[in-house]
Amino acid sequence: MHKHNMKGWVVPCAIAASTYVKWCIGLGSYSGYGTPPMFGDYEAQRHWMELTIHLPVQQWYRYDIQYWGLDYPPLTAYVSWICGKIGSWIEPSWFGLDTSRGLETPGNKLFMRASVITLDVLIYVPALYAFTRIWHATRSSRTQHAALITLLFHPALLLIDFGHFQYNSVMLGFTLLAINAFAVGFDLVGAVLFVLSLGFKQMSLYYAPAIGAYLLGKCIFLGSKKGLKLFTRLALVTTLSFVILFAPFLPPFSPMSTLAASISRIFPFSRGLFEDKVANFWCFTNVTVLKWRRLFDGKESLLVKGSAVLTALGFFPAVAGLLWGCYKTQSSPPADQQSQASTPTLPLLPYALLTTSMSFFLFSFQVHEKSILLPLLPLTLLLSGASPGEEVFAWGTLGNIVGVFSMWPLLKKDGLGIQYVAMLLFWCRLIGYNPFRVQFNSFVHLFSTVVNMSMILLHLLEMVVTPPARYPDLFPVLNILVSTPVFGLIWLWSIKRGIQVSWAIAGLPRSRTDGKIKLAKDGAHDSDNEPASATDRRPVALGGVRRDAGMRTVSLGYASGQSSGVGGRGLVDPRRRALERMSRRAGSVEVDRVAGER
Amino acid sequence: MQEDKTPEQPKALPWHHPARWLNGSQLVTRSEVDVLLFSTAVKLLLFPSYHSTDFEVHRNWLAITYSLPISQWYYDTTSQWTLDYPPFFAYFEKLLSIPASFIDPQIVDLHNLNYDAWSVVVYQRSTVILSEIVLGTALLRFIRGAVDPSWQRVLSASLFLHPGFLIIDHIHFQYNGFMFGILLWSILMAREGRKLASGLLFAVLLNFKHIYMYLAPAYFVYLLRSHCMSPSGEILPTKFISLANTVILVFGASLGPFILIGQSPQLVSRLFPFTRGLNHAYWAPNAWALVTVMDRVLLQLARRFNVGFVVHQQGVVSTSRGLVGDTTFAVLPTVKPIHTFAITIAFQVMFLVKLWRTPNYKSFLTALTLCGYTSYMFGWHVHEKAILLVLVPLSLLAADDYAHFKTYMIASVSGIFSLFPLLFTPSETLVKIVYSLIWGVMVLRPLQKQVYEFPTTFTWVILEQLENSYLLGFAPLLAFILAFPLVFGGNSQVEFLPLMMTSVYCALGLVWAFIRLGTIYLRQ
């Protein structure tokens, strides 16, 4: 479209096309379709709409817990109430108390699907658009559009939300809005938005350490006086928004036990270490090394503590990186003159989010396979601005594809096989990634090749071979064996990248040479890790590090846009736009990435 | 992102690159593979969508051709959906039924009526996607030899991704992509001057689906004038005989077996059931839709002012519900098949005379479009799906100049909109609307920018304004149709209103586009 001078149409068309694709996925089956007596997530969400509109708030977290009792935080309940009200206005029988259990009429399906799409369009899509405008502000509009398209068609989220049926995009959308708010310096707004995200689905706790560390880091960065002020404000605002969110469950409106009931529903520590088959550390080692459940039979609490410690260790580097980065840059002179908009650690935030959420996914307690969506969001955010050939691109695509693959058993159970194939095909082509390509020029490419091959092989095997009666779960287990190492490596990679970026940030303001030496060292360290021919590797390593560590802070971050002060962006923007217009007139031969949709 | 940097030209690809498998000799550019893959992904997603009775019709034909001997094909009445396509299509179904029997034997069970398990859905929908390769290859060949490949590429992509195909083939369920693929191959052969091949392919197409007879007069005249006669008008007997033999051979291969066992009367009665009414259940937006609505208006006027019209009581109840059956007008004289036939022939003769005088490719293409268009406008019991017969050849003319483009734009918008009622289920509403909108923006915007010309006379300024406001009028119409069930839900007195309004409004555009194209052609 850029080619045909239709720049203004890219964003509306991309959003329309993604909505279309989402709706098409929704035409298919959903979780628990036609499987009485418990059905699945679809029934759970519908049931919550049913119980919130018919029962008083005090009963929400207590009513018939055995049949899909409400176990999400209050915002989900409020949203369910609104949807339920609207739905029962259209057709009361959809949400009759107890009478509507297991309801599967086409009209109800239509309404439920429409509710997901509507919330997605209202929250997640604007958040993505804002992300590309804010975080890629210094990039060309073409890159921004490319990033938006990459994010809009994110296959894992689309398959789970619009196929399997959940409202993850609301939670992710709020988190994304919070990150956007941080980037433009509205920390308090960001904090409220993140509370909303937590209040919609407790799963966004996966992000909490990174967000918390970022905000704390900013307080440190601002110095003792300003920092303390910000800290108190943040604490107040956060507490207040939690209180408002939980207000109907608090004493003036209801007895204290209501709150306790909701808390115990939201954090179910009484359940097992993991459910079904999840591609995380516990399940992986359970299969390969030792049987955790048998080993800790009766000592479940020890296991809980163990998982908590491991998780904390897992996200420690990210948190430390954020805090250390801020501490290092604290005394640098430009910081004082800068507006309070953002800290230099901002570019670190996506990596930190990735590290913490992935560490939660790998090591924490009670993880669902769907939780992989949380690490995939920051990974895709990082991927969105990258171009093929970069390390970020390779890891991002690999992570996304394996993320979708790890949910294959779930999607297969839901009857979403066709959608799975179609979305992977669609997205890979969209971002210009070819999973069939054999590449050996770096570790990540070699690794991707091996993983892709084994995934294809597994799918082929599953088509041909029926698992022996002794091992009915053969294929889900093999799936885990492939997926877990990938997730583990992505976690390690995110830590490595986090360290690189924080080095770059902390090193630069003091002396340029200092930073460069560190980067070069890091580059050398890099190539030690990755077996490749020296001639081949050298330029890539240098280019990669320079671009990844140095330029990345500029591009993903916001620093250069902000460096000229608050008014800077306003001045910079028209000029850049004029330049782009000129280059467009000059007849750029670039190919329209969405040519396929013409 | 990769696309940003890769030039449009095909480059040497490593052996394992899938694009290389797709083209073999590196004839396919990246963006063409994009179109193929994206559209395939979208079509895969549509597998679970609504499918009409045509799905069961085709499944039943698989069962008939698989389990019955050829002599029984046109006699079987186990299902109400009897075989009523010409023999080549029956052979095609026979071919498809063989893999189907391996995948799920129940698909080809004759008595397993209304079978729509996931296996048969996936199988039949996949065959539609696969058979569209014929369309895809034809469109690729159109790009290769085009005068201006970059615009032909847009047109080819627009045809491959046409909302008409998406709605009729991939949701409603038919094999139009395949059929139009054959038609486009035939047109392509005509463009390349290989007229014998063109005639052969068209004869084959006729034996797949006889609705293409609408286009036959243009073929007949064009091949006779440009292939069988020299430019000065002398008949070339060898060419004539070779063409005639080719056509006879094709028909022999198709109809031969049935003629040999003496089934030709049965075949004819199956293929041409002349027992239907003037209009289909939902009036196809053609001239008769306008006449019918005029009849309704006159009836209301007659009632209100007690004018001395002769009101046929039979007609008063006939059209208001719009059911299948005979349409009888209340005020206007009743239309009989012979009338529609005569009007169609009269219009076609005008265009064919023009074609006879200028027997070149462009002229042939326009005459072909107009032949189909005339049949659509004035034919007896036309189905709204037949609009593809107009839109597909018309697309090939769209980038010629602004006059052609504007005609194409009006015809496409109203033609595609007129297909919306085919999908009446609420789930597919968003699908058809959003897809068509995206298609419209992607195809019409760049083409319009390319060929736009300022209107030169005052009349044209006015007409341009009228046309644009007509096109804008589709937005409120759509809003009205979407809001209608919410406001008037359950009121059976007015439930036909959205369909009638769609039909009449689209008919206005289609009739105007017909007049435009006819005038452009005759004045050229």
Image (tube, helix red, strand yellow):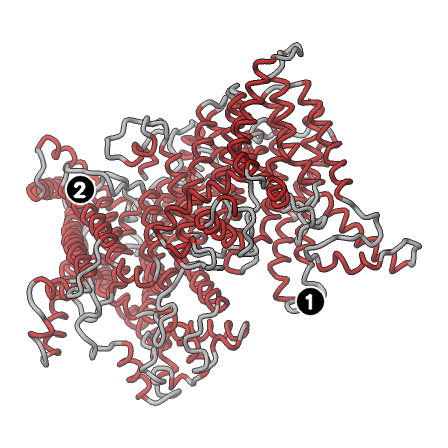
Quadrant for the N terminus of chain B, please.
top left
- Residue type, numbered disc 2: His
Crowding around mark 2 (Cα neighbors within 10 Å: few <14, some 14 to 19, many 20+) is: some
Please report, as a chain letter, where disc 1 is located.
B
Choose between A426 and A143: the one closer to the eye.
A426
Picture coordinates of residue A337 (x, y %)?
27, 51
Choose between B161 and A115: the one closer to the eye.
B161
Choose between A519 and B411: the one closer to the eye.
B411
Query: Which residue is pictured at 62% across the width and 46% down the height?
Result: B384
Query: Which residue is pictured at 9% across the width and 78% down the height?
Result: A297
Disc number for residue B419:
none
Task: Give the residue pinned by disc 1.
Answer: B492
Please report, as a chain letter, where disc 2 is located.
A
Picture coordinates of residue A156 (x, y %)?
31, 56
- Mark 2 and mark 1 on one chain: no
- Residue type, numbered disc 1: Ser
Task: Give the residue pinned by disc 2.
Answer: A445
Q: Is residue A535 left or right of residue B97?
A: left
